[in-house]
């Protein structure tokens, strides 16, 4: 909260008050003479001088209040507005069976993907974000939205199964790009995560990346998974989950080409920490400049001073018009 004046130069008029008081003292030298006997009696009791001086005091006070009203006192609070255009982002997440490999934490590759994606979403502001899941088929889970709570719930609910066996990387990218094709944002991004090779689907991943580039969409690709063998659940039996130990192969060359063609970047995440670092860098790279406008919002307070000054002038007139003010 700050106090200011719209017309601070008006405060210089307050200097006229002491000058007027000096003039008034010189214009009325000596004691005050009272023409009426009752006035003399009041003066003898110390009331005459007070009554005679009151109109002048009221005039000086009223003048000061009116000057303050003219100066325009106001209080204000600083307001900061931030404006950002935002980015349209679609997250394409591989949910094939190999994403259940337990070489990343928490739990498995899909768990690590969900955790880091949720953290990325929580750190965004004013961006429209969508979610696509793909395995042998691709499906839009959430269209572009700023409802981050709905988006977080959808990410938490991602599961392997339901979209067939295999990995259709091209279909996943095509579904994500289709969501961005009519987006109004100038900056459009797809972040695609996969741990395998393209072995299903109707769309060639390289053609999908070139089509995305034509639409002005940058594609960031993330290859997930370690180079070692990992346990993968393959069946649920009466005695528990049956696992297979296998090594999954990531087509790094394909993912790198997809990113290069579209003007994006390719990343390799062999463990959970590396995956977090990848999302941190993407979050840093895909930021729009924020236009900040600072100003002070004021509330005017001249009216109370104006009314008080007017009341003072009325009181001065009343004093001069009554017996209290009839002093020669």
Image (cartoon, rainbow, N blue to C red):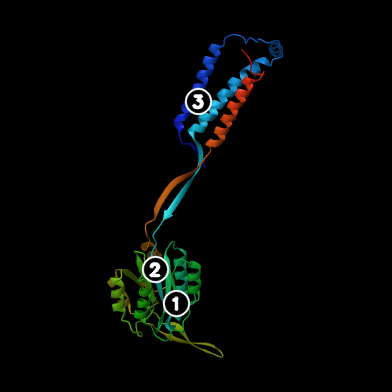
Gap between marks 3 and 2 measured at Cα: 62 Å
Which element is circle 1 on?
helix
Work out whether 4 lies above or below 30.
Answer: below
* Residue 222 visible to an observer of this rendering: no
Which residue is at the front of the view, 117 or 77?
A: 77
Q: Is residue 1 above or below residue 65?
A: below
Q: Helix, strand or loop at disc 2?
A: strand
Horizontally, residue 33 falls left or right of residue 76, namely: right
Give coordinates of residue 55: x percent, y percent: 60, 21
Closer to the camera, 33 or 290? Answer: 33
Disc nearer the start of the sequence (3/2):
3
Q: CA distance from mark 2 to mark 1?
A: 22 Å
The location of residue 304, given as percent across then percent down, is 57, 35
Q: Which quadrant does the C terminus fall into?
A: top right
As drawn, the label of residue 13 is none
Q: Which residue is mark 2?
A: 89
**Residue 83 position within the rendered picture, expressed as x and y whole percent measured from the top left:** 41, 55
Q: Nearer the viewer, mark 3 or mark 2?
A: 3
Closest to the camera, between mark 1 and mark 3, is: 3
Q: Which residue carries the number 1 mark?
A: 109
What is the distance, in whole Å, between disc 1 and disc 3 at their CAs? 77 Å
Residue that lies at the very extreme toward the bottom in this rendered image: 238
Say which residue appears at 63% left-offset and 21% top-offset: 319
Q: Is 56 located above or below residue 220 in the figure? A: above
Residue farthest front in this picture: 321
* Residue 201: quadrant of the picture: bottom left
N-terminal-most mark, 2 or 1: 2
């Amino acid at each position: 909260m700050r106090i200011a004046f719209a017309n601070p130069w008006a405060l210089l008029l307050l200097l006229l008050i002491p000058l007027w008081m000096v003039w008034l003292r010189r214009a009325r030298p000596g004691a005050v003479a009272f023409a009426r006997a009752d006035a003399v009696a009041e003066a003898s009791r110390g009331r005459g001088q007070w009554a005679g001086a009151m109109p002048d005091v009221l005039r000086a006070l009223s003048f000061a209040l009116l000057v303050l009203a003219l100066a325009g006192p106001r209080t204000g609070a600083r307001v900061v507005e931030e404006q950002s255009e935002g980015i349209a982002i679609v997250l394409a997440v591989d949910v094939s069976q190999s994403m259940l490999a337990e070489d990343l934490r928490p739990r498995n590759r899909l768990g690590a993907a969900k955790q880091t994606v949720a953290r990325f979403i929580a750190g965004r502001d004013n961006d429209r974000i969508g979610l696509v899941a793909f395995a042998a088929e691709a499906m839009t889970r959430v269209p572009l939205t700023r409802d981050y709570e709905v988006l977080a719930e959808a990410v938490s609910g991602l599961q392997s199964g339901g979209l067939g066996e295999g990995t259709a990387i091209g279909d996943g990218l095509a579904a994500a790009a289709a969501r961005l094709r009519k987006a109004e944002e100038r900056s459009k991004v797809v972040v695609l995560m996969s741990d395998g090779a393209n072995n299903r689907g109707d769309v060639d991943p390289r053609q999908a990346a070139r089509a995305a580039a034509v639409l002005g969409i940058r594609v960031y690709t993330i290859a997930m998974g370690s180079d070692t063998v990992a346990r993968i659940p393959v069946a649920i039996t009466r005695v528990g989950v049956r696992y297979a130990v296998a090594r999954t192969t990531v087509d790094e060359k394909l993912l790198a080409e997809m990113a290069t063609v579209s003007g994006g970047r390719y990343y390799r995440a062999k463990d959970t920490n590396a995956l977090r670092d990848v999302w941190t860098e993407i979050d840093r790279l895909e930021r729009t400049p924020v236009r900040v406008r600072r100003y002070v919002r004021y509330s005017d307070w001249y009216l109370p001073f104006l009314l008080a000054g007017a009341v003072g002038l009325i009181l001065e007139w009343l004093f001069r018009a009554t017996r209290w003010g009839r002093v020669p």
